[in-house]
Image (cartoon, helix red, strand yellow):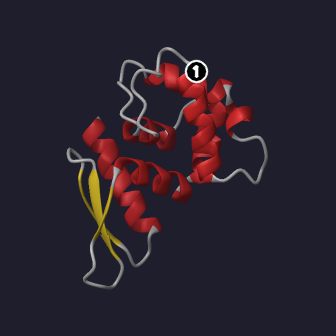
Amino acid sequence: MKRLLNVALIATLGLVGGACTVVSDPSSGASGTTSGSDKTTFMNRREQITEFAKLNLESLRSDMAVGQGEHLSSLAVLLEIDPNRQPAFFMLARDKFTVLFPSDRTTAPEMLAALKGEMQADPRFSQRLTLN
């Protein structure tokens, strides 16, 4: 399941990125992207999460509002949330939706900062937080 979600994430980033090519080894936590040049940039886990959230913000907003969905599941994988705790993560996202998205203009970094705060306050997630 995790591998399938990583493949879906890579495909989504590739489709949304347009002229970018995304090459990723899901087990390494790093991705390289090129955009028409020979220059390769490696993204760390935090950058991957931020980029994913930026590219999929409206889908994440919809998924978080109902506490389920493909993009929310992919975010859980990127955050390295244990599969056994993902249902609790989905409920947290739904229950804290108005905190995560206080307005229609909430940006991905703002949502991620709010999510980090909510996860840090929740003992189920505070031990292992990847958002840094």
Q: Secondary structure at mark 1?
A: helix
Q: Nearer the viewer, residue 22 or 63?
A: 22
**Among the 4 quarters of the image, the one containing residue 118:** top right
The location of residue 66, given as percent across then percent down, is 64, 31
Q: Does residue 20 appear in this view? A: yes
Residue at image location 64% in from the left, 47% down from the top: 110
Q: Which residue is mark 1?
A: 121
Residue depicted at x 25% and y 83%:
38
Describe residue 43's horizontal placement relative to residue 54 as left or right.
left
Q: Residue at position x 34%, y 53% from top?
A: 44
- Quick check: 48 above or below 35? above
Tell me residue 69's x, y (percent).
52, 37
Q: Local crowd at mark 1 within 10 Å, few (<14), some, or many (≥20)?
A: few
State the residue lying farthest toward the bottom: 37
- Give the total of numbered labels: 1
Classify residue 68 by image quadrant: top right
Q: Using the image, determine if residue 117 lies above or below residue 7.
A: above
At 77% from the left and 40% from the top, the residue drawn is 102
Q: Position of residue 72 (x, y in %)?
A: 50, 38
Left or right of 32 on screen, residue 69: right
32 and 68: which one is in front?
32
The amino acid sitting under disc 1 is: Ala
> Which residue extends farthest top?
123
- Quadrant hosting residue 2: top left
- Residue 93 at x, y = what percent? 60, 30
